[in-house]
Amino acid sequence: MSKRPRRNHSAAFKAKVALAAVKGDKTVAEIAQLYEVHPTQVVDWRRQLLDRAADVFGGTPAPSEPPVDLKALHAKIGQLALENDFLEGALIKAGMLSARK
């Protein structure tokens, strides 16, 4: 059995499939076969459509994740790297770790 290459579907295609699933005229399996997508994908798109339907009519958008402070993350990475180097040197001096280099 050959593996199908990954496909990226347009938003319009996803909306069409999700609306067909919401209508309820056909089963999820029939819709999946008709549009050549996996039934799980049909259910996911249907759920996303129903979850976000209120946004179309001016509902409050879902709260987005807070922005990540990259500067603080880089500082933390630097601090951890420095601590690792220090502890590695201490372990080598104590004879508990052989030199890797």
Image: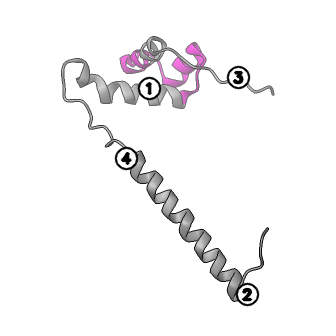
Residue ID for mark 1: 45
Q: CA distance from mark 1 to mark 3?
A: 20 Å
Q: Secondary structure at mark 1?
A: helix
Which amino acid lies under the numbered mark 1 shown in the image of this protein?
A: Trp
Image location (x, y in percent) of residue 41: 52, 28
Disc 1 residue crowd, few under 14, some 14–19, many 20+, Cα 10 Å: some
**Quadrant the N terminus occupies:** top right
Residue ID for mark 4: 69
Which segment did they paint magenta?
18-39
Closer to the camera, 68 or 39? 68
Q: Secondary structure at mark 2?
A: loop
Label pair 1/2, CB-CB below 8 angstroms: no
Question: Which quadrant of the view contains residue 51?
Answer: top left
Q: Earlier in the sequence, mark 4 or mark 2?
A: 4
Disc 3 residue crowd, few under 14, some 14–19, many 20+, Cα 10 Å: few
- Left/right placement of residue 56 relative to residue 67 reads left
Which amino acid lies under the numbered mark 3 shown in the image of this protein?
A: Pro
Residue ID for mark 2: 95
Q: CA distance from mark 1 to mark 4?
A: 32 Å
Image location (x, y in percent) of residue 37: 58, 21
The secondary structure that dominates the magenta segment is: helix
Image location (x, y in percent) of residue 38: 58, 26
Front of the two marks 1 and 4:
4
Q: Earlier in the sequence, mark 1 or mark 4?
A: 1
Question: Which quadrant of the view contains residue 30?
Answer: top right
Closer to the camera, 41 or 91? 91
Which amino acid lies under the numbered mark 2 shown in the image of this protein?
A: Gly
Front of the two marks 1 and 3:
3
Label pair 3/4, CB-CB below 8 angstroms: no
Q: Earlier in the sequence, mark 1 or mark 2?
A: 1
Q: CA distance from mark 1 to mark 2?
A: 59 Å
Front of the two marks 4 and 2:
2
